[in-house]
Image (cartoon, rainbow, N blue to C red):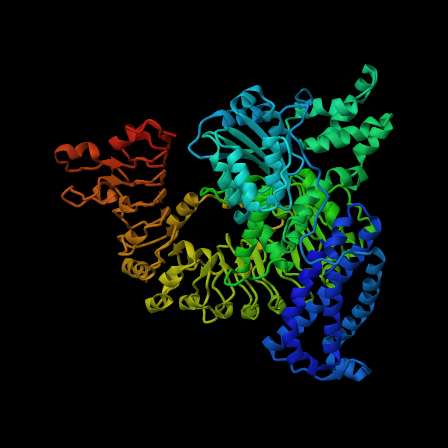
């Protein structure tokens, strides 16, 4: 943990030094020497941190030394950040600097230099304190190392008493089948994957002792590999198992030849337990020499890392999960109740089950805590264990956190902080991937590498942790991408152990103020607040006592129900000035004063349902990377100075439907990667549609209020097709709605009280389309305007999702639409003048199609498939990949049928929607019948309502 902090601090320092040497040393004489000394001190400390971190689990003094270093590193990071802010401010606002001497600052020169001199003095003070820490490290006789260190590993063997194994019968039987079946791969590689202590080795031992396995192979070989992957030791162990004695050969080539000869004409099972290295160069020679065995020989590996299984080209994998409750209980009783009378067992059973629940199905934890309780003779002793934080127990440090420390040590130092930060979430919390990545970015854990932006680096770090079994219970999107996860409780405990009280979670429930322990005041750096979703709960003022706080975030799943009292903002903005990530939820329409004091802020999430405008003071947060106003649905104006936020990368503003325009300055934000909605305005303060071309949004983009475009040349100059990073595009052709007035404000209900009307306003897209139907059309707007604009707004050809809203053209068939060969998702909503559908059957990749509120459409026929007017077509498969199809609110739709001309044997070859699995038809009162091809699809699930002529009156 400390090494990760120091390493990040060193990188930050190195990245800033060149600019300081050029600019700042001319302003504060003497600071360059102090900066060099600071770098030297950090280098000396960093050299011993690998050894220190490996010893902290067992040595309390070392742990305390690392804590002092960690706190000092945080303070240095803050000061460097203040200096960087001063440089940014000078660049953006042109503030002229003045020169002073660090050695003897006078009061007048101090006032002139202001923040710069104050920072320089602090750096000098830090060096004096670091000198002490550097001297203290010599007391512990640390080993100097810059490579990955070793951690004590217990060698495994194949010997196990199968009668003592609790559970794992299902995994064992699955594995036995894999080991005994025939395979095309030679030798066939099977992998067992899971977190440390989950029971991978036990499953391998259990299966290797099965008679069917023993009788299926001529030789079963067990090798504990561990780290490092020592080819010589592994080769000698295999030879010893095959021949009964060790080899004295010294060359690796000779060892591999010996193995190849020994396994000739043998059907073998080689079990490689606890494999860590995913270096193919080390694995390939061993694998090649094993190919001389008989067909259907097998290699079984156990590993915590999916990358190992991929590297070894493992065909079959078994993911070992937590033990079921019943099997955990059997194991627990065997250890905890050993030697006790039946009466004692009955007396302790209830509390034992509660203690067991803390183990969360991890066999190693069950054994550890069961063995601990075996020596606790009284019920009070068991109750103490139940009431304690397991991660604070010494027995857990040694027996549970030791194996988890192996996984932690195996992480690159740049990912270690990303892992430990997850301790900020409560146990069993649903962690949203992109949200977590933005928080990592806010704290400087992600650095741009080459051409990869920080968001991509964050995704790689997340995937890395997931593949090392440190995350679980994955949530995936429709395209099988991981978008969320959880942490096993004991992995969470381990992260807490590493961070001590650095990460804190509190729950507010409206009944009483949570107690903030005074010992936390100097230790807590990251705080998450959760609350119930059935009542509004104020946050306690005592939180402002946590002066070192860098993260103050609310539960993202229910931020509307956790509010800050109005009297808290002065203290929060005035005292928690180190904040880098902040969520604030407040009632009322006035933004709290003082936000400009949070100069370190990188992540800001605002929650308010009545605020109309963001203050200009926000634009002084030059370090801001993420601005999330998703929960500010009635926001109408962004600050005019938004162009000063030159580091802004993510502007989350969906769903925010009331924004009038995007300020002109937004086109200066060339680092912007996320812009959910771009609003076209007709105000002289608004950024034109053309200004969007200076941005480079990734992923999703909605261009809203296209009805405000007065000159289509703006759209032409935009050249939307060149936005290669755009994958999901929404084009909304609506115009500005009525201006809001003060009188309107007075009529609205206070936003702080959530009402049924508020809930009903958050309707699905189909119901929103109905509301749009009822909006009056502007008399100056013509159908041809929308048709021309749609043709000009050609998206990039790699687009995967396209939604078109409130389109007023007569046709919706731009020339570019059929060129979208990668389009998977298409939604057409509220195109009220369209009488015909485009030839969507030609879209080869389309998987989802939704058509809503086309009230002029009466007939769906050949043109929908892409068949010529004479009924012929060069294609015989229409909508080849379409899985879901939905029609809603089609008030005039009457017919759905095709007339296809077939010739000879071609009749049976025509296929329409062969992949369709879901059909939804809702509120289409005039539709008479469904086409024949839908009736032939027996696997199709139909969801039909409010279609009386189809037999579905409701």
How far across and how far down the image is residue 492, in percent? 69, 42
Residue at image location 60% in from the left, 31% down from the top: 243
Residue 171 occupies quadrant:
top right
Confirm whether residue 310 shows in the render: yes
The percent coordinates of residue 651 (x first, y second) are 53, 59
Place residue 920 in its image quadrant.
top left
- Residue 309 visible to an observer of this rendering: no
Q: Is residue 92 left or right of residue 904?
A: right
The C terminus lies in quadrant: top left
Q: Nearer the viewer, residue 298 or 320?
A: 298
Q: Is residue 539 left or right of residue 883?
A: right
Question: In this orientation, which residue lies closer to the viewer: 949 or 101?
Answer: 101
Q: Is residue 219 left or right of residue 566?
A: left
Q: For this rendering, which residue is in front, 516 or 159?
A: 159
- Residue at the limit of the structure toward the front, as seen here: 248
Residue at (57% x, 19% y) in the render: 211
Residue displayed at 73% across by 60% down: 47
Name above or below for residue 937 compared with residue 13.
Answer: above
């Amino acid at each position: 943990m400390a090494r990760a902090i120091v390493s990040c601090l060193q990188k930050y320092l190195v990245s800033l030094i060149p600019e300081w040497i050029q600019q700042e040393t001319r302003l504060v004489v003497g600071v360059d020497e102090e900066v060099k000394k600071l770098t030297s001190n950090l280098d000396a400390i960093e050299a011993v941190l690998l050894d220190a971190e490996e010893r902290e689990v067992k040595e309390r003094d070392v742990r305390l030394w690392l804590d002092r270093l960690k706190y000092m590193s945080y303070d240095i990071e803050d000061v460097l950040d203040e200096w960087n802010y001063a440089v940014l401010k000078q660049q953006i606002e042109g503030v002229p600097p003045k020169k002073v001497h660090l050695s003897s600052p006078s009061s007048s020169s101090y006032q002139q230099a202001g923040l710069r001199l104050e920072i320089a003095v602090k750096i000098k003070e830090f060096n004096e304190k670091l000198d002490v820490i550097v001297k203290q490290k010599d007391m512990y006789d640390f080993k100097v190392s810059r490579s990955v260190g070793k951690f004590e590993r217990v060698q495994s063997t194949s010997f196990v008493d199968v009668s003592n194994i609790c559970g794992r019968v299902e995994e064992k039987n699955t594995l036995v089948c894999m080991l005994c079946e025939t395979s095309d791969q030679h030798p066939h590689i099977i992998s067992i994957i899971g977190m440390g202590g989950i029971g991978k080795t036990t499953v391998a031992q259990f299966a290797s002792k099965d008679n069917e396995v023993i009788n299926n192979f001529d030789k079963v070989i067990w090798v504990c590999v561990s780290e490092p992957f020592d080819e010589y030791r592994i080769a000698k162990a295999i030879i010893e198992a095959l021949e009964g004695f060790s080899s004295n050969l010294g060359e690796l080539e000779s060892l591999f030849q010996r193995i190849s000869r020994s396994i000739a004409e043998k059907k073998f099972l080689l079990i490689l337990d606890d494999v860590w290295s995913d270096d193919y160069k080390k694995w390939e020679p061993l694998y090649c020499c094993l190919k001389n065995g008989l067909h259907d020989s097998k290699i079984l590996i156990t590993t915590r890392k999916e990358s190992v299984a991929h590297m070894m080209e493992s065909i079959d994998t078994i993911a070992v999960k937590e033990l079921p409750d019943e099997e955990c209980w059997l194991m627990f009783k065997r250890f905890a109740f050993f030697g006790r009378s039946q009466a004692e067992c009955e007396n302790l059973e209830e509390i034992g089950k509660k203690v067991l629940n803390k183990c969360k199905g991890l066999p190693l934890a069950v054994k550890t805590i069961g063995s601990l309780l075996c020596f606790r003779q009284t019920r009070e002793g068991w109750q103490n264990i139940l009431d304690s934080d397991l991660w604070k127990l010494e027995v857990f440090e040694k027996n549970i956190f030791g194996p988890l420390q192996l996984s932690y040590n195996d992480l690159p130092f740049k990912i270690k902080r990303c892992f430990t930060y997850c301790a900020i979430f409560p146990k069993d919390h649903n962690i949203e991937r992109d949200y977590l990545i933005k928080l990592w970015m806010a704290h400087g854990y992600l650095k741009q590498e080459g051409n990869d932006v920080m968001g991509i680096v964050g995704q790689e770090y997340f995937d890395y942790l997931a593949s090392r079994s440190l995350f679980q219970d994955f949530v995936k999107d429709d395209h099988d991408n991981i978008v969320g996860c959880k942490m096993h409780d004991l992995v969470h405990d381990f992260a807490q152990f590493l961070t001590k009280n650095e990460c804190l979670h509190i729950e507010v429930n409206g009944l009483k103020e949570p107690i903030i322990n005074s010992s936390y005041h100097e230790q807590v750096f990251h705080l998450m607040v959760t609350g119930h979703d059935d009542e509004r709960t104020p946050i306690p003022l005592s939180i402002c006592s946590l002066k070192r706080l860098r993260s103050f975030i609310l539960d993202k799943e229910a931020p509307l129900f956790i509010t800050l009292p109005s009297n808290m903002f002065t203290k929060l903005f005035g005292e928690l000035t180190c904040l880098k990530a902040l969520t604030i939820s407040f009632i009322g329409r006035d933004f709290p004063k003082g936000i400009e004091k949070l100069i370190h802020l990188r992540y800001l999430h605002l929650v308010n349902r009545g605020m109309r405008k963001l203050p200009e003071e926000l634009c002084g947060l030059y370090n801001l990377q993420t601005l999330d106003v998703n929960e500010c649905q009635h926001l109408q104006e962004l600050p005019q100075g938004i162009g000063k936020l030159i580091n802004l990368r993510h502007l989350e503003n969906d769903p925010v439907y009331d924004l009038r325009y995007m300020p002109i300055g937004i086109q200066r934000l060339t680092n912007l990667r996320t812009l959910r909605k771009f609003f076209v305005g007709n105000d002289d303060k608004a950024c034109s549609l053309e200004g969007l071309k200076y941005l480079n949004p990734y992923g999703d983009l909605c261009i809203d209020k296209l009805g405000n475009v007065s000159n289509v040349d703006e759209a032409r100059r935009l050249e939307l097709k060149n936005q290669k990073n755009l994958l999901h595009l929404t084009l909304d052709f609506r115009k500005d709605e009525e201006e809001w007035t003060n009188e309107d404000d007075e009529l609205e209900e206070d936003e702080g009280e959530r009402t049924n009307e508020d809930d009903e306003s958050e309707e699905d897209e189909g119901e929103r389309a109905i509301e749009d139907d009822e909006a009056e059309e502007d008399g100056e707007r013509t159908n041809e305007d929308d048709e021309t604009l749609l043709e000009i707004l050609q998206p990039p050809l790699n687009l995967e999702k396209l939604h078109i809203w409130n389109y007023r053209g007569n046709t919706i068939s731009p020339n570019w639409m059929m060129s979208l060969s990668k389009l998977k998702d298409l939604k057409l909503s509220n195109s009220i003048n369209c009488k015909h559908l485009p030839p969507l059957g030609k879209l080869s990749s389309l998987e989802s199609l939704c058509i809503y509120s086309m009230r002029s459409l009466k007939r769906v026929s050949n043109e929908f498939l892409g068949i010529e007017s004479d009924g012929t077509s060069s294609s015989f498969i229409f909508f080849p990949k379409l899985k879901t199809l939905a029609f809603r609110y089609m008030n005039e739709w009457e017919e759905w049928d095709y007339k296809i001309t077939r010739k000879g044997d071609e009749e049976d070859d025509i296929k329409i929607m062969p992949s369709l699995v879901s059909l939804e038809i809702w509120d289409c009162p005039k539709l008479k019948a469904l086409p024949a091809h839908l009736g032939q699809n027996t696997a199709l699930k139909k969801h039909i309502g409010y279609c009386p002529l189809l037999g579905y009156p409701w």
